[in-house]
Image (cartoon, grey):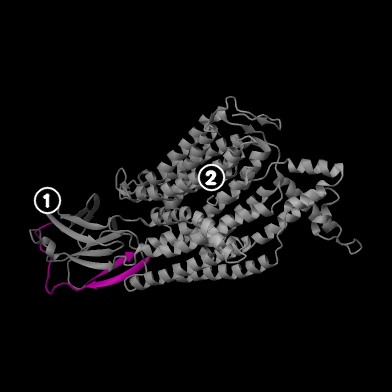
Amino acid sequence: LSDKEEGKRKKSKSKVDCCGFPLSIFFIVVNEFCERFSYYGMKAVLVLYFRYFLQWDDDLATTIYHTFVALCYLTPILGAIVADSWLGKFKTIVYLSVVYTIGQAILAVSAIHDITDLDHNGKPDSMAFHVALSMVGLSLIALGTGGIKPCVSAFGGDQFEDQQEKQRSTFFSIFYISINAGSLLSTLITPILRAQECGINSQQKCYPLAFGVPAVLMAVALVVFIMGSNMYTKAAPKGNIMLEVCRCIGFAIKNRFQHRSKRYPKREHWMDWANEKYDKLLIAQVKIVLKVLFLYIPLPMFWALFDQQGSRWTLQATTMDGNFGAFKVEPDQMQIVNPLLILAMVPLVDSVVYPLTKKCGLNFTPLRRMTVGMFMAGLAFIAAALLQIQIDVSTYSHTHTHTHTHTRRVLCLHNCGMRTVLEQRNQVYTVCWNLSSGSRLVNGFEAEVNITAGSKDLGFIPQFGFSNYTQLPEGTSTFLISNRMGQICEYSQSLGFGSSYTLLIPGDFSFGPECAKTIRPIEDIKPNTVHMAWQIPQYFLMTTGEVVFSVTGLEFSYSQAPSNMKSVLQAGWLLTVAVGNIIVLIVAEAGQLPDQWAEYVLFASLLICVCVIFSIMAYFYTYIDPMEIEAQFAEGGPQDKEEKSKNLSMTDVIPASEDKKSEVKQSRI
């Protein structure tokens, strides 16, 4: 696993080509597919794990989810610095993949409820233990996935010779397909695994399986990557341009502060205060980078809305009907609409929409495209708000609490006019049940009864007592009511998606052929009536915004960046994603809006305001050609040329900028 310390390329011991491509890239593509399957599969069910396994409320689940995503987009900078300045790309990928795999395994273990379920009631007795394990696992995953993010694609680019430009371009296309294929399949499969029931002592939603399969795929990714070790071309670390840029900026600020007196003449740009120490070419390049980074300031707001597809929109889907007739869609499966639309819309927009606007004489510049993308994301949240209002209207008269599972509370009542207190998701309902006049409990059986529904045992319910709510699948459920004398009554109830019932066993209940007729079902929550397909318009608007915003943004950054600083802007781009997720967790915790639709409107309003600001900034932006500026310095003296050569030889902070195709293609990162 060693890289040579010299600044030379380390050639593979046995370089093998297949169809004109280095054989080593196939190991890299398979590795990327498995890693993306692992990440997106875990991420798809994560917010429901927080909500229904760890029993957090919607706001806390959303906050922790976006904290995790933010960490995943902060750690790439650390991974790039380690790879470029110390370990090299290969070692960095291997070591952090080990950390990644361990994190996935710990997360899967944290979802096993039987570990602390000592009383076998299906609920962990020590929730703090599961929370601590899951937080450790997610921290390791964030470090692993973020750390290898900037290395894998660039490492693939290293496998090609300079004359293999066409093959390298094809590789990045295949690499992009592997990313989306992994995302697509995992978003489809892991929610199905989560919906299964598993357990040793009691059957619950199978989060261990939903997290365990991604953990196995990550282990496979690591093994496959190591298998190709002898075939790889490995470039030794050469230093990181990001650190040099930071030092240059820091010196300029320090020098300007030390010479803030009026007796010192002003300089054209504050970065010119770095002239005493740094090469003029480097200073000119930093100016260009800062100019583009200034445009990045409004961009986090787009990502604040975009990444809520995995949190708020998934929670919204839990309150909707996912029955599509021939198949049923789980709430966390709706996220699959995004990658499906991306695969369809990217070629459509590139080959039809953009050429059409050009023929119509519209100057659809990259910054204008990005403005349209932000506006489309705002419209997506307006659509989400309208849908949320419809959901609230359809359920408000029954309860303020929504659930994507089917629940039952079975009460054994005796006396007429008995007052019973029902507790449901932090809300208390007091209900007075007026049974038939003069009815009594027929003492042909014990005062307590045992209730089972399929594989779930609700246990014995004492006289005048009631059971806890129990999650049951959609469809017809059969309840078996028995006493200690062995008598059994069978009762069936049809359960709609998201419905909740209370089954009353009245005082005149008796075992026998007609026993089921005396049981009275009380509908606490009506089935979800708003269909999940109504989320498709908001996914369409959001994906349209992503295509014209994200892909265009990467292309714009590449075209405006100096030759040796393209990945500095890539680091800045990833940072906007992290900041966007931080915005969500701040709003989720501090906003405390009473209605979810109001929060959607708030986000949409903020983005539209930011969109206006960005459009004004874009109007005053002047497009440049970094190559022309660098060419001006190439005509300078030998010392300038030597310094320029030194600066240009440094490795980028995010090595994924080996090729323009890699920058533009990887919109799903």
Q: Disc 1 marks which amino acid?
A: Gly
Dot 1 lies on which element?
loop
Whether the residues at callouts 2 and 1 have beta carbons within 8 Å, the answer is no
Q: Quadrant where the N terminus lies?
A: top right
In the rendered image, which residue does mark 2 sit on? 173
- Separation of disc 2 and disc 1 at Cα? 67 Å
Residue 316 pos. (x, y %): 41, 63
Q: Position of residue 383 (x, y in %)?
A: 45, 69
What's the mark number on residue 486? 1
Estimate how packed mark 2 is, as few (under 14), some (14 to 19) or many (20 or more) residues with alpha carbons within 10 Å.
some
Magenta stretch: residue 342 in it? no
Name the quadrant containing residue 648.
top right
**Quick one: label 2 or label 1, which is nearer the N terminus?**
2
Magenta span: 418-446
Q: Residue, x 53% and y 37% (percent of image)?
A: 28
Question: Secondary structure beneath disc 2?
Answer: helix
Horizontal and vertical percent position of residue 37: 45, 45
